[in-house]
Image (tube, helix red, strand yellow):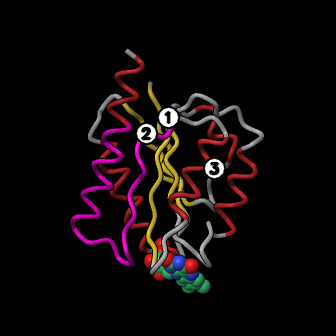
Amino acid sequence: MTRLIVVYESNTGNTRKMAKAVAQGAREVSEVEVVLADVGQASEAQLSEMDGIILGAPTRNTKIPPAMSQFLDRMKQVPVRGKLGAVFGSYGWSGEAVGLLRSALVAQGVRVPGVGVRAKRTPDAQALKQCEDLGRSVAQRLVKEAS
Ligand SMILES: Cc1cc2nc3c(=O)[nH]c(=O)nc-3n(C[C@H](O)[C@H](O)[C@H](O)COP(=O)(O)O)c2cc1C
């Protein structure tokens, strides 16, 4: 079975809405088992069993907020090189976190095609669709690579 995890941090729910849409899109691909986890509940050890890793976080003070930052640090103990990844997140005005998340994954050897999805504040229908498309496309690519 191909496995994909969506790990997110969200303080006021906007990135959580995006995470749910990403997972929903990925679940349309029946060959893929999708895990959706708040960063507070996710264990980095789980990551080694995953083929795909999608991370989401809002921007806080121009950075990735602390819980996700710490998760990324702990991820360095896990062999994630070569896995497929993607990123997303909500922001208010500057929105650096999505790019920083992407760079952090790439630095750990995760393949991240595309720039990810950013939504200003509460994701609207268009942003949620982009999130679904993101999840679906990662899942489809994983299936293709596994075959
Ligand atoms: C303390 C604090 C700092 C923030 N700093 C930034 C920032 O530097 N740049 C930005 O684009 N948004 C910033 N925001 C806005 C959040 O990214 C935005 O409200 C986002 O929708 C929150 O997502 P969430 O509901 O998933 O927590 C900040 C919000 C808070 C509360």
Q: Residue furthest top?
A: 147
| Residue topped by disc 3 | 104
Give the image quarter of residue 97: bottom right
| Residue topped by disc 1 | 84
Give the image quarter of residue 17: bottom left
How packed mark 2 is, by other alpha carbons closer than 10 Å (few <14, some 14-19, many 20 or more), is few
The amino acid at mark 3 is Ala
Measured as percent of width and height from the top left, residue 10 is found at 52, 70
**Taking the image as drawn, is residue 68 in sight?**
yes
Q: Are marks 3 and 2 in contact (CB under 8 Å)?
A: no
Measured as percent of width and height from the top left, residue 12 is found at 48, 79
Query: Which badge, 1 or 2, comes first in the chain's sequence?
Result: 1
Q: Is residue 22 magenta?
A: no
Q: Are marks 1 and 2 in contact (CB under 8 Å)?
A: yes
Q: Secondary structure at mark 1?
A: strand
Residue placed most toward the observer, 29 or 135: 135
Residue placed most toward the observer, 80 or 37: 80
Of labels 1 and 2, the one closer to you? 2
The amino acid at mark 1 is Leu
How packed mark 1 is, by other alpha carbons closer than 10 Å (few <14, some 14-19, many 20 or more), is many
Q: Secondary structure at mark 2?
A: loop
- Which region shows up in magenta? 112-138
Left or right: residue 67 versus residue 84 is right
